[in-house]
Amino acid sequence: MRLLGAVLAGGRSSRFGSDKALAMLAGRTLLDHATTALGAHVEQVVICGRQVAGRRWLADRPAPDMGPLGGLNAALHHAAAEGFDAVLTTGCDMPVYPAKLARALIGEGPAILKGQQLAGFWPAVLAGALDAHLAEENNRSIHGWLTRIGARIVERPDILLPNINRPEDLERS
């Protein structure tokens, strides 16, 4: 199975107070950590929702500021056009992506880690369905999308991911 990795990085970082993708952790940006961690499990990594010099990036689709679903939609269309079977996703504020997480998500149909909906597995054939979803009103809820496509919710209490939403979360990491 050919997997595309997508780091969803188009958020506004409102709870963080500044651009958290560029926040430093152990001498590297959170975006660098997320890209490296996800890259261990996929053939190629793209950054969605922001332009990053020297990296392959995709603009949100169908428009900027669509939230995580805009980045996911861009990744799904890129995956389908480039012959990838599916997309493995993470948020730019998730600096680790253990192998056991990737193994738990990859499988039959779309899946997310319970409590971390940006850690997901998405078959590329969902691109058209996400276009249709985003064309509707009240279209930006990832929970609504998950319900619509019947995504698996993977419960793995042994997989604890740091999720950095506030500066104090970064200090604890």
Image (tube, helix red, strand yellow):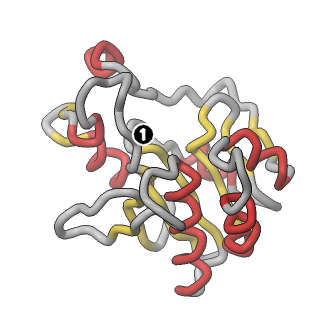
Residue 76 is left or right of residue 163, and the answer is right
The residue sitting at the front extreme is 137
Secondary structure beneath label 1 = loop
Q: How many marks?
A: 1
Q: Is residue 173 visible?
A: no
Kindly give the residue lying farthest to the left in the view shown.
Answer: 27
Q: Residues within 10 Å of mark 1 (few under 14, many from 20)?
A: some
Comparing 50 with 158, the one in front is 50
Q: Residue at x 25, y 37 (%)?
A: 19
Quadrant for residue 115, please give it: top right
Give the image quarter of residue 14: top left
**x and y percentages locating residue 129 in the rendered image:** 76, 67
157 up-or-down from 66: above or below: above
Relative depth, front residue between 30 and 51? 51
The residue closer to the viewer here, 124 or 17, is 17
Q: Position of residue 41 (x, y in %)?
A: 50, 60
Task: Using the image as rendered, state which of residue 56 and residue 103 is in the foreground.
Answer: 56
Q: Residue at x 18, y 69 (%)?
A: 54
Residue denoted by label 1: 96
The image shows residue 142, relative to residue 128, as above or below, that is above
Identify which residue is drawn at 86% across, 50% down: 150
> Of the residues shown, which amino acid type is indicated by label 1?
Val
Please state if 19 lies on the left or on the right of 133 as rendered: left
Locate residue 146 relative to residue 39 in the image: left or right.
right
Quarter occupied by the C terminus: top left
Res. 13 in view: yes
Quadrant location of the N terminus in the rendered image: bottom right
Position of residue 14 relative to residue 168, above or below, is below
Looking at the image, residue 53 sits to the left or right of residue 39; the answer is: left
Q: Residue at x 74, y 66 (%)?
A: 132
Residue 8 picture location, percent across and down: 45, 51
